[in-house]
Amino acid sequence: MIKTTPDKYQDIRDAVRALCAEFPDEYHRKIDSERAYPEAFVNALTQAGWLAALIPTEYGGSGLGLAEASVIMEEINRSGGNAGACHGQMYNMGTLLRHGSTAQKELYLPRIASGEWRLQSMGVTEPSTGTDTTKIKTSAVKKDGRYVINGQKVWISRVQHSDWMILLARTTPLADVKKKSEGMSIFMVDLRLAEKTGMTVRPIPNMVNHETNELFFENLEIPEENLIGQEGQGFKYILDGLNAERTLIAAECIGDGYWFIDRVTKYVSERVVFGRPIGQNQGVQFPIAESYIEVEAANLMRFKACQLFDAHQPCGAEANMAKYLAAKASWEAANACIQFHGGFGFANEYDVERKFRETRLYQVAPISTNLILSYMAEHVLGMPRSF
Ligand SMILES: Cc1cc2nc3c(=O)[nH]c(=O)nc-3n(C[C@H](O)[C@H](O)[C@H](O)COP(=O)(O)OP(=O)(O)OC[C@H]3O[C@@H](n4cnc5c(N)ncnc54)[C@H](O)[C@@H]3O)c2cc1C
C-alpha cells in the first residue's frame, strides 16, 4: 500500500481496515455482479458501531465528529468496498441530531445505534425539477394531526435497505412564500409502513450497483410528530445535511483515489513490456504521480470542511470545494488506473472497472461539478446570479 502521512485517526483507520479485510475483493465483486446489497458487510459495520459514529454516547453511539465519520467512509472505499451502500446513515443522522426534538432523538437514535433501525434514505430529488430543489412539487398538507403527502421523487437510494427516510416536501406552495427557500419541511417516513399506505417504489437499474428508486406518493399520511424542527424551515436544515454529505463523499473519493493509485503503481511496477516494467516510462509515471498530488490536496480541503462542520461554523464553500477536488482527483486516478492496466483493466477480476464505474457517479451526484462551480462563482466570489 502507498505510504500516506500518519494522522491522528490511525486507530480508527486500523480498526476499520481490519473489519474491511474480512470482506475481500471477491466479496464485493460477487455482490456487484449479482446486483445485490452487501448485507453482511453493512451488518458487520453496524455491529462494530461504525455506522453510529455520529450518535452521541447518551443515545448509544460513539459521539464522534464528521472528521472521524469521514475517515470511516474513506477506509471502506480504500479497502475496495463502496461506502455508497451505507453512507446515507452518516449524513442523515446530522439532520436528526441538529434539528430533531429530544423526543425524536430518544425514539430514533438508540434504535439506529443498536442496528434495530436503519436511516439510510433521503428523498430530495424530483424528476421535473432536478437540481432546482426549491421548485419541488411534492406537497405535505396538514390535516387532522397528520400530513398528507402527494408527489414523486427520483433517484432515492437504499429505500429497500432502510427502515426510515428523511423526506423534503413543500408545506407552503412556492407562490405563497417570500423567499423560494421557505415553505419546505422535512419528515421522518417509516418506509415499510409507507409501502402499504400510499408510497410506491420502482427500482431504477443503473450503471453502478447502487440501489436507487423512483417513489410515488398518493395520499400517504404521516403523523405530525414526524416533522423535524419547524414547519417551513426544512430547506435550511437539509443544507446542513448536504454539506455533511458532500464532505463524506469527498472522503470516499479520496479512499477511491488511494485505491486506484495503490493498484496501478503495483501493476505498472510488475508488468513488463518491451523488456522493462511499463512503470519505468515517464509517460506512465506522470499521470499517476499527478493523481496522487491531486488526491493529497483534496484531502486537505476535506479536513478543513470537517473541522468547520464539527465547530458548527459555515462550511458550504469548503464542503463543495472538497467534493469537487476529491471527485476530480479520484476520476483522474481511475482513468490512469484503467489505462495502464491495458486490457486487464476491463476484466472484472481486477476490480478496476467496478471501482471506475463507482467513482464516476460522484461527478454528478449528489451534486454535479457545474453546480459546485456555480455556487463558488455566486456565493464565494460574488459574481452575478445566473439562475
Ligand atoms: C445513483 C444515484 C443515486 C442518487 N441518490 C439520491 C438520493 O438518495 N436522494 C436524492 O434526493 N437524490 C439522489 N440522487 C440524485 C442526484 O442528487 C441528482 O442526480 C443530481 O443532483 C443531479 O440532478 P439531476 O439528475 O436532476 O440533473 P439535472 O439537474 O437535470 O442536471 C443535469 C446536468 O446539467 C448540468 N446543469 C444543470 N443545471 C445547470 C446550470 N444551471 N449550470 C450549468 N450546468 C447545469 C449539470 O452538469 C448536471 O449534471 C442520486 C442520483 C444517482 C445517479
Image (tube, rainbow, N blue to C red):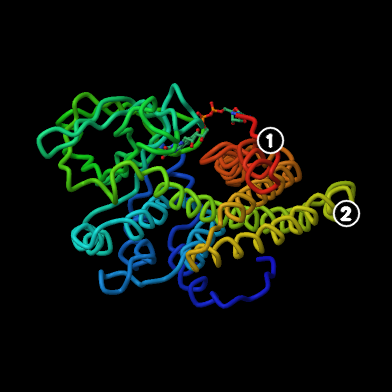
Q: Would residue 173 be found to the left or right of residue 360 on screen? A: left
Number of numbered discs visible in the structure rendering: 2
Q: Give the x, y percent position of residue 166.
A: 32, 44
Q: Is residue 86 above or below residue 312?
A: above
Q: Does the residue labelled 2 lie within 8 Å of ligand 1?
A: no
Q: In the displayed image of the protein, which residue is found farthest to the front?
A: 178
Alpha carbons under labels 2 and 1: distance apart: 55 Å
Q: Which residue is drawn at 89% across and 47% down?
A: 274
Q: Earlier in the sequence, mark 2 or mark 1?
A: 2
Q: In the displayed image of the protein, which residue is found farthest to the left?
A: 144
Q: Give the x, y percent position of residue 104.
A: 21, 57
Q: Please, what secondary structure does the residue beneath circle 1 have? A: loop
- Is the residue marked by circle 2 packed among few (<14), some (14-19), or many (20+) residues within 10 Å? few
Q: Which of marks 2 and 1 is in front?
A: 1
The amino acid beneath tag 1 is: Pro
Q: Is residue 9 above or below residue 34?
A: below
Quadrant of the rendering where the C terminus is positioned: top right
Q: Quadrant of residue 1?
A: bottom right
Q: Quadrant of residue 55?
A: bottom left
Q: Which residue is drawn at 57% across and 78% down?
A: 8
Q: Is residue 218 above or below residue 222?
A: above
Q: Name the residue under label 2.
A: 276
Q: Would residue 52 be found to the left or right of residue 260 on screen? A: left
Q: Name the residue under label 1.
A: 384
Q: Give the x, y percent position of residue 258.
A: 65, 58
Q: Give the x, y percent position of residue 246.
A: 53, 50
